[in-house]
Image (tube, rainbow, N blue to C red):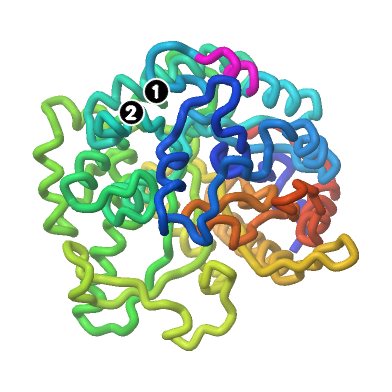
Amino acid sequence: MNRDSFGKDFVWGVSTAAYQIEGAYDVDGKGLSIWDVFSKKKGKIRNGHHAELACDFYNRYEEDIRLMKQLNIPHFRFSIAWTRILPKGVGEVNQEGINFYNRVIDQCLQQGITPWLTLYHWDLPQALEDKGGWTNRSILDWFEEYVRICIDAFGDRVQYWMVMNEPVAFVGAGYFFGKHAPGRWGLRYFLPAVHHATLCMVRGAKLIKERYPRALVGTTFSHSVLEPISLKTRHINALRRADAIMNRLFLEPILGMGYPIDAVKALKNLKKYILPGDEDHISFDFDFIGLQTYTREVVQFSMLMPYVWANIVEPRRRGVKHTTAMDWEIYPPSIYEALKRFQSYPNMPPIIITENGAAFKDEVVNDQVVDAERTKYLQDHIEQVLRAKEEGVDVRGYFVWTFTDNFEWAEGYHPRFGLVHVDFETQKRIVKGSGKWYGEWLSRDSLSSQMV
């Protein structure tokens, strides 16, 4: 595998999320998010962890961005915390929050690193959740206000924007299964949240384009490559239903294909939340689509999962021994298969891998972290990206998840995905072997800072 094969304009970077790294959860006017509240509930987060300090990026952003520069990382994807900008979700703007992100953006530019902003990465203001959150159609106006403020504050220096991160994850885990913030569960929460999130993705994208027509605007979708446990009809049908929810539910309406309501009977109830004219506002010609994929999943029919009638077969039950700390199968062809699937859509814009990476049990020995498994994971997956690109897939970038070890939502600090090890007691950073490899990989030739 030769890096030159990707071309000089191929984008390489790292991805992060505000809530997972910033800390400083209640300083300088920041309001509480749903994750600040959810994390305090007993039994919701592994080991009772919380993100009140996290990686202290709020105070250490200069150090971390300089470290990115040392590792030759040219693109940095990070999200904005809605509650730093609008502590109550709407209304009075918190200038301290604006100032913080201005400093981060300016530091990136000073170091020759291109900032990519994600507007929403799961940390809804609790004040808005108290009014119904994503189940309340008023969120279209709340989100528009927030986006407009961000565009006016940062649009003069930021070219690359992502409206949302993995809507099926925050809607599904937060409003159907209740395993993520805000902890709601059931179809009556899930369906309106689905539709409102879709409308907000489009509204946010239109706002950015109206204000800055030259901005490049995308949004990100998770994708799980699915296989049936056998070719029996009930398992194949289970896979189709699971695929409709996990992979098609948000992507297809954005591409102008509408919701996959025929695949899952329960989705027909979406119609009660679709108002006249909404069909004209659930699709958008994004400049790029972010694809986030980590593994494949095997699906079987199950009576225990209502509506979808399917569940995921855990790797160990399939005899898979090589897994990550998240108990995800290590299967590099999954990223190739996901790219091919995305490219098969007739209206698919250019694709950016906006997240891919792996968590392993890292050990610090003599102030070093030798993480050969993660290095191999990245190498093998990048090789599969090249395979897809050489077969004609219009993939234009790859971002590693993630730069530093961080707060991994309901899993707390247990899984470490970072290229950089963080001691969460001292906040000391140690570049892992995988980080050193990635830095060397990125230093092999000059990189363009623009995507064409």
Q: Are marks 2 and 1 in contact (CB under 8 Å)?
A: yes
First of labels 2, 1 by sequence position: 1
Q: Nearer the viewer, residue 265 or 216?
A: 265
Element type where label 1 sits in the image? loop
Was residue 99 drawn as part of the magenta stretch in this picture? yes
Residue sticking out furthest to the bottom: 319
Q: Is residue 162 visible?
A: yes
187 to the left or right of 323: left
Q: Which residue does the image show at 50% across and 33% down from the upper left?
A: 162
Q: Nearer the viewer, residue 164 or 46?
A: 46
Q: Would you say the magenta stretch is mainly helix, strand or loop?
A: helix
Badge 2 crowding class, 10 Å Cα cut-off, few under 14, some 14 to 19, many 20 or more, is some
**Stretch of the chain drawn in magenta:** 94-100
Residue 119 x, y percent position in the rendering: 48, 30
Rendered position, 179 above or below 115: below
Q: Which residue is mark 2?
A: 128
